[in-house]
Image: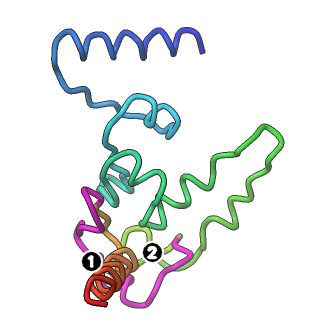
Amino acid sequence: MTIQAGILKLIAELQRDLKVSVLFIANNPGLVSAVCNSVAILHQGKIVENGTVREVLRQPVHPYTAALLSAIPRNKHEKIDLKKLMASGEAAGNGGCSYYSQCLKRQHRCQQTSPALQLINGSHFAACHLGVERSELNECSSLASKIS
């Protein structure tokens, strides 16, 4: 942990002194939230969700991001049942979502098509039919409240 903290401090100093951006690749959301301003979540080499660290890690839209975050124990005594985080089943057809076979929220259309990254809100993007629908619902309710 001491070495990790030292390396993170050094990265931050170099970034500040050299006035450069840093691409930080990690599988630890805690480190990502400590070091980064924005984050991209990849599944099988494709970005499925991206935005600010706060947007993505606090309000994940893509089921893969939600499963990743749910797989992190909150304390040393918590046991995580990975079987409850992922479904099992057949793979999607050509052009379908790469996460289809493991997704707990999958729908028939996910087997057929995988949406491109679409704006959810702010700078938050996700490649998920459900996320796009949620974004549209938020826009409609926001518009309705302005009209009322």
Instruction: Give the quadrant of the N terminus.
Output: top right
- For marks 2 and 1, the one nearer the N-term is 1
Disc 2 marks which amino acid? Tyr
User: Secondary structure beneath disc 1?
Assistant: loop
**In the rendered image, the vertical position of residue 23 relative to residue 50, given as above or below:** above
Q: How much space separates mark 2 and mark 1, taking CA atoms?
A: 11 Å
Q: Residue at x 21, y 9 (%)?
A: 17
What is the three-letter code of the residue carrying label 1?
A: Gly
Badge number at residue 47? none
Q: Which mark is residue 100?
A: 2
Quarter of the C terminus within the rendering: bottom left
Whether label 2 touches label 1, CB < 8 Å: no
Q: Number of callouts in the render?
A: 2
Percent coordinates x, y for residue 95 in the rendering: 27, 77
Mark 2 secondary-structure assignment:
helix
Residue 91 image point, x, y percent: 45, 76
Residue at the far right: name it.
Answer: 77
Q: Residue at x 52, y 79 (%)?
A: 105
**Residue bearing the label numbered 1:** 95
| Residue 80, percent from left and from top | 74, 53
**Mark 2 neighbour density, 10 Å: few (under 14) some (14–19) many (20 or more):** many
Q: Which residues are magenta?
A: 103-124
Q: Quadrant of residue 129?
A: bottom left
Please name the residue shown 43% across and 35% down the image. Answer: 32
